[in-house]
Amino acid sequence: MTGDTPRRAARDETLPPRRILVTGAASGLGRAIATRFAADGHKVLMTDVNQLRALPLPDGDVTFRHLDVRDEPAWQSAMAWCRKTWGGLDVLVNNAGVAAAGRIEKIELADWDWVLDINLKGTVLGCRTFTPLFKDQGHGHIINIASMAGLVNPPGMVSYNVSKAAVVSLSETLRHELKPFDIATTVVCPAFVRTNIAESLRSPDPALAETARRLIENGSLTPEQVAERVATAVETKPFLVLTHSEGRRALFAKRWLPWYLNYTFAKNWRKSLNRMSTEADAALTSAPPTSEQ
């Protein structure tokens, strides 16, 4: 396979359509994944906290349910719906996530809770809820959307890195834990994708937030291109999917040329620190003087 346009594994038309639940599916990558599966003839349950954004639903056998991934009873309700309506579930795509940037001493604990609750706990709850169902029916496939940030851990986005690294660790554990039950686990690690995730971005550092937004807006792949890789993963069931060529290069450098990756991170981080220092000085200079009483 070359470049960033993969050859898709065609769906086996002799098999019935798969029953697939996608979280965070109202927009961005989640919507692209749901749309791709529906176009392939699968049954899709789109879930999100924002129903209005999900409308109109993609063409095909598509249903929407409200689901806050932090809410365990909501997960149980979604699982009960799958049992009653579909008789089970074949693929769970834990896609819901939020973005964050900032330095360790700047990020508020409330924002740590927010990132970890959605990116990590939401994924844990999805896996925890549907594993008994997958075991009962004798098969299943968990696809967790993590990030290259969880593999190479660049500075300036510590809470996001931690949340996604934990999703990678969770996925690797489940890969071994669930394999005896014919339950596959895949973790997808994109680099920057041109989605609307920057709308939810929280950061105490305006300069880092602006850098993150720019990187997202200039991402080398569209949500639809990443969704193609996810569709292929449903057919081939790999453990790790690296969607971006720059992500594959970064992981190669971490494994075989760590000095180069460390040098690159250090150089770019010094630039970021200098820029933040300059902006802080400018803000102090432009601030109106305070009057003395």
Image (tube, helix red, strand yellow):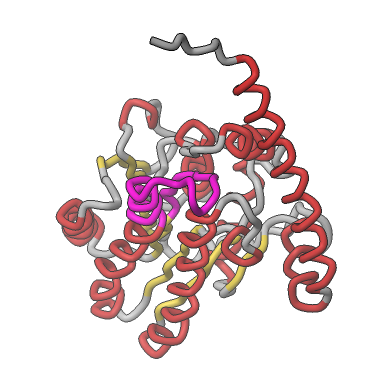
Image quadrant occupied by the N terminus = bottom right
Residue at x 78%, y 73% (from the top left corner): 258
Q: Position of residue 264 (x, y in %)?
A: 81, 58
- Image vertical order of residue 85 relative to residue 89, above or below: above
Residue at x 15%, y 55% (from the top left corner): 73
On screen, residue 28 versus residue 109, left or right, reads: right
On screen, residue 275 versus residue 240, left or right, reads: right
Instruction: Tell me where residue 130 sits by quadrant.
Output: bottom left
Q: Position of residue 129 (x, y in %)?
A: 25, 66
Q: Position of residue 20 (x, y in %)?
A: 39, 56
Residue at x 19%, y 51% (from the top left corner): 74
Image quadrant occupied by the C terminus = top left
Q: Where does the magenta region start and end?
A: 95-119
Residue 44 showing in the rendered view: no
Residue 56 showing in the rendered view: yes
Q: From this viewpoint, which residue is outermost toward the front?
A: 293
Query: 63 or 74, which lies in front?
Result: 74
Residue 286 counted in the magenta span: no
Query: 284 or 204, which lies in front?
Result: 284
- Image vertical order of residue 224 relative to residue 239, above or below: above
On screen, residue 211 versus residue 131, left or right, reads: right
Residue 106 counted in the magenta span: yes
Instruction: Tell me where residue 241 sits by quadrant.
Output: bottom right
